[in-house]
Image (cartoon, grey):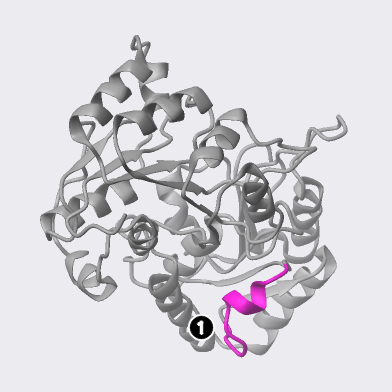
Amino acid sequence: MNQLGSRVLYLPNEAGEWRQQGLRLGLARLAAGQLIGDVRIFSPLWRLQNGESDVFGQLAQLVHDFQPHIVLVQHPERSELYGRHWQELRQLAEFTLVLHEGDLYDRWHRPPPRELRSAAAYADVAFSVGASAQLDFLRRCGVPDVRWVPTAFNSDQFGHAPLPLDRPFDVVLIGNANGSRIPLHSMPGARERAQLVAAFQKRFGKRFAVYGRGWTGPSAQGPIDFLDQGRAVQSGWITASWEHFTTESRSFSDRLPIALASGTVHVTSTKPGFDDVFPPGQQFLHHEPNVSEIVHRVAAILGTTSPGQRMAAAAAGRQFAFDHFRQDDNLVTLLNAGGARIDPARATEIWKIAAPALHEL
């Protein structure tokens, strides 16, 4: 359904006090700029956790009354929306169902939840941050149109602090120690992350810092709030990571775009498709196939570049992140797949509008 001034119903995945502020702000600005019509937001998981009764009944009534042109559902895990619910909603209004899955799953370590399978079975188009096995999974669920979209960052929250020349650490890693001794209970890549932390500690000593839960030793800085990641990134010249699900093409955690936007040179584990995402010859993102080569690459960058050169690379990385990994730009992609017909150039102009984030309506 192609519709100028589309009515949009957004179903985010939110728990506790956490809100998807990036998309809420984006929707508010698109509506204020008259690039979409009216917007409603309904957060199933948040309502369920708050003990509300008949959550699906409330959603069904909203769909009946609002008659959305586009329903955007994001990461439906624990939403308790199953096939029978989507079938009923389809009978209440004519809309395009756009599914956005920003997490990764696999058969053994993290099986896809029933809610994701159900939403995919009724979706008109689905987006995934993984471009290989996860797209294949969505196709098998019955989605007629599956597409890759990059993991993105909230450009209102990150990327605005000046790039500092005074950095107390050479290399910083942000991530929790989430390994397990029980087979298949660790996320893929957890062991390599622990090895990377140990190798950095051995090579760089006090010039290395690791932020996150579960780490011990002189480099451990303790847990860090999500919104404090920019400060942690800027405490080091280089940020490093080991990605989960190393065979899933073009996939990366949000720590990568947050690191680039915050202003750093980033070194991470190689994944298929990275050379398609990041242009050849750039100096802000490096990827290597194993722990020892990541450590070697970090040492080589520190040993062969000046602070000024690293600052220039960090500035280029920040610009790249803002050009390619913004959540609000992703939002336009998702809505246009649902027929919203938003001009991306006009959307870029209205991202500066001072609109409050939309709340539950």
Residue 303, given in percent of the width and then of the height, sits at 69, 84
Residue 281, given in percent of the width and then of the height, sits at 61, 90
What's the residue at 58%, 46% (across, down)?
103
Magenta highlight on residue 47: no
Please, what is the dominant secondary structure of the magenta stretch?
loop
Q: Which residue is mark 1?
A: 313
What's the residue at 29%, 57% (across, down)?
156
Decide if residue 17 is on the left or right side of residue 233. left
Residue 311, given in percent of the width and then of the height, sits at 47, 81
Residue 18 figure quarter: top left
Q: Is residue 83 above or below residue 257?
A: above
What's the residue at 61%, 29% (across, down)?
114
> Which quarter shows the C terminus?
top left
Q: Amino acid at mark 1?
A: Ala
Name the one closer to the observer, 319 or 164: 319
Magenta highlight on residue 276: yes
Callout 1 secondary element? helix
